[in-house]
Image (spheres, helix red, strand yellow):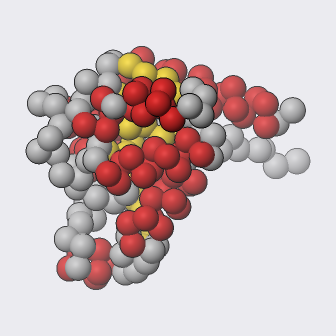
């Protein structure tokens, strides 16, 4: 009988591509999260973009991890020349051809959990997709913009707490997110 391989968890790090409004240490924390994902033998998935997702990918690759990007472009040429997005620090990039909103849907659905670092409107879109899909979500508070408003958005939306954990510490946040994934997997495999 062949050995059954355990499927690695896929962690999406979602955040601002334009980081001018993020906290001073947001990129450093994104890079640390990427390293932690790789060190835990999980796969990092990103929007194949600049800013916080790029730094997370850089961190994952520095720790020998695997990074899969989901691009809004339909081809590598469009990814680079039309969207002006990077290709380094990724092992594979899926060229969705679905612009940003379609890419966001595929990205979040491909992940077992989504972690929010800083963020702007696109990150909020990825958050709401993950929330509606009842995915585990981690929010790295103190990194700016969207990440620092998620608690209030959830509270004011009157839709329940979702499967969300909050922390200012990347290591603690990832640990709690993995616990949420483990819980989901245990329920789904019963």
Residue 183 drawn at (x, y percent): 69, 26
Tell which of 177 and 18 is nearer to you: 18
User: In the rendered image of this protein, does residue 111 appear above or below residue 78?
Assistant: above
Q: Which quadrant of the figure contains the C terminus?
A: top right
Position of 34 relative to 81 (above/below): above
Q: Please say if 143 is above or below 48.
A: above
Residue at (25% x, 37% y) in the render: 145
Q: Is residue 80 left or right of residue 163?
A: left
Q: Residue at x 42, y 52 (%)?
A: 125
Point 55% across, 41% down: residue? 131
Residue 13, percent across and down?
Answer: 39, 43
Res 10 visible: no
Q: Quadrant of residue 140?
A: top left
Left or right: residue 15 compared with residue 26: right
* Rendering coords of residue 77 (x, y %): 28, 82
Q: Is residue 136 above or below residue 94?
A: above
Q: Is residue 76 left or right of residue 136?
A: left
Could you say which quadrant of the image residue 139 lies in? top left
Q: Position of residue 9 (x, y in %)?
A: 57, 40
Depth check: 34 or 112 in front? 112
Residue 164 visible? The answer is yes
């Amino acid at each position: 009988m062949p050995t059954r391989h355990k499927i690695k968890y896929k962690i999406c790090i979602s955040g601002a591509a334009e980081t001018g409004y993020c906290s001073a240490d947001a990129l450093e924390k994104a890079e640390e999260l990427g390293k932690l994902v790789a060190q835990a033998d999980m796969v990092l998935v990103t929007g194949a973009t600049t800013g916080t997702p790029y730094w997370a990918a850089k961190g994952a690759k520095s720790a020998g991890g695997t990074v899969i990007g989901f691009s809004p472009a339909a081809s590598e040429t469009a990814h680079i020349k039309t969207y002006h997005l990077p290709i380094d620090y990724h092992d594979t990039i899926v060229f969705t051809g679905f612009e940003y909103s379609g890419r966001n849907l595929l990205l979040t659905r491909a992940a077992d959990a989504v972690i929010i670092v800083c963020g702007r409107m696109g990150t909020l879109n990825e958050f709401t997709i993950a929330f509606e899909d009842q995915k585990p979500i981690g929010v790295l508070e103190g990194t700016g913009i969207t990440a620092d408003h998620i608690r209030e958005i959830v509270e004011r939306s009157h839709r329940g707490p979702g499967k969300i954990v909050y922390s200012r510490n990347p290591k603690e946040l990832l640990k709690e997110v993995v616990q949420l994934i483990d819980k989901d997997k245990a329920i789904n495999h019963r």
